[in-house]
Image (cartoon, grey):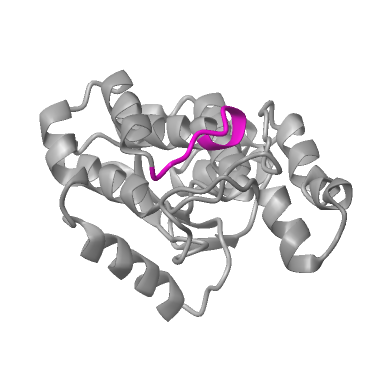
């Protein structure tokens, strides 16, 4: 029986991208990919984000806070630096804050349809990359279909899904589940009953996973 690791996050959240990258790295370094069930759950940062926009995150921040665009751009430097440390290119300032509901619906549909946690992880990685590195709009169905195709999903079924409201209730329930725990921030992880709020380093994840799987300390601790 596989050990379930539950994660709540949003594809427009840079810290979710970093946190999940460190989690996947820990799993790979432990060599336990086949022992893990990757249970990805939805939590939208901005429920009211539009389907499309011409404004970047930095431009919106500059407008909302009445600050120079250069200062608004600099506000995203922290996530950019943390991302670089994780081997990621995070261009949050120049990304477009569009609604992530359809992206979440596609992932939850794929999770329920294929029962393949590696596929779920791959979809998440591609959505993060599309948003933060390529600055594509995650509410754009063509972008989502491109990612679906890359991951060998049934494109006809994905098109039907995106044209409907299917799995919206699943996404909303997962968000409600997290809020019922009194958690207001993401990423959020549950590993064998242990709860982790925010970005954790690889060592922390390795210790939690290794101990839960009954591995010897020397197999997961860095001496």
Q: Is residue 106 visible?
A: yes
Work out whether residue 218 or residue 196 is closer to the camera in this orientation and state it: 196
Residue 75 location (% of width, % of height) = 81, 52
**Range shown magenta:** 131-139
The residue depicted at 63 percent of the width and 49 percent of the height is 15
* Magenta residue check for 136: yes
Say if 154 sits above or below 19 in the image. above
Q: Is residue 154 visible?
A: no
Magenta stretch, main secondary structure class = loop
Work out whether residue 134 or residue 125 is closer to the camera in this orientation and state it: 134
Hey, which quadrant is residue 22 in on the image? Answer: top right
User: As drawn, is 37 to the left or to the right of 69?
Assistant: left
User: As drawn, is 95 to the left or to the right of 59?
Assistant: left
Check the image and name the residue furthest to the front.
54
The residue depicted at 45 percent of the width and 57 percent of the height is 50
Say if 110 sits above or below 174 in the image. above
User: As drawn, is 152 to the left or to the right of 7?
Assistant: left
In what quadrant of the picture does the C terminus appear? top right
The residue depicted at 81 percent of the width and 52 percent of the height is 72
The residue depicted at 28 percent of the width and 50 percent of the height is 105
């Amino acid at each position: 029986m596989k050990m379930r690791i539950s994660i709540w996050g949003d594809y427009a959240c840079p810290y979710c991208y970093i946190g999940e990258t460190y989690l996947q790295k820990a799993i790979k370094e432990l060599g336990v990919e086949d022992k893990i069930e990757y249970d990805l759950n939805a939590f939208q940062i901005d429920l009211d984000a539009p389907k499309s926009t011409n404004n970047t995150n930095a431009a919106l921040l500059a407008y909302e806070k009445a600050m120079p665009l250069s200062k608004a751009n600099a506000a995203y430097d922290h996530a950019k630096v943390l991302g670089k440390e994780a081997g990621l290119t995070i261009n949050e300032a120049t990304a477009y804050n569009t609604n992530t509901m359809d992206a979440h619906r596609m992932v939850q549909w794929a999770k329920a349809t294929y029962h393949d946690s590696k596929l779920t992880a791959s979809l998440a990685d591609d959505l993060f990359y599309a948003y933060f590195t390529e600055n594509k709009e995650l509410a754009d169905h063509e972008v989502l279909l491109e990612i679906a195709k890359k991951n060998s999903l049934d494109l006809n079924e994905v098109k039907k899904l995106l044209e409907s409201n299917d799995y919206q209730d699943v996404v909303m329930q997962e968000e409600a589940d997290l809020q019922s725990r009194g958690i207001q921030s993401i990423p959020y992880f549950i590993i064998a009953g242990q709860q982790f709020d925010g970005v954790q380093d690889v060592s922390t994840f390795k210790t939690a996973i290794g101990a839960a799987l009954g591995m010897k300390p020397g197999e997961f601790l860095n001496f």
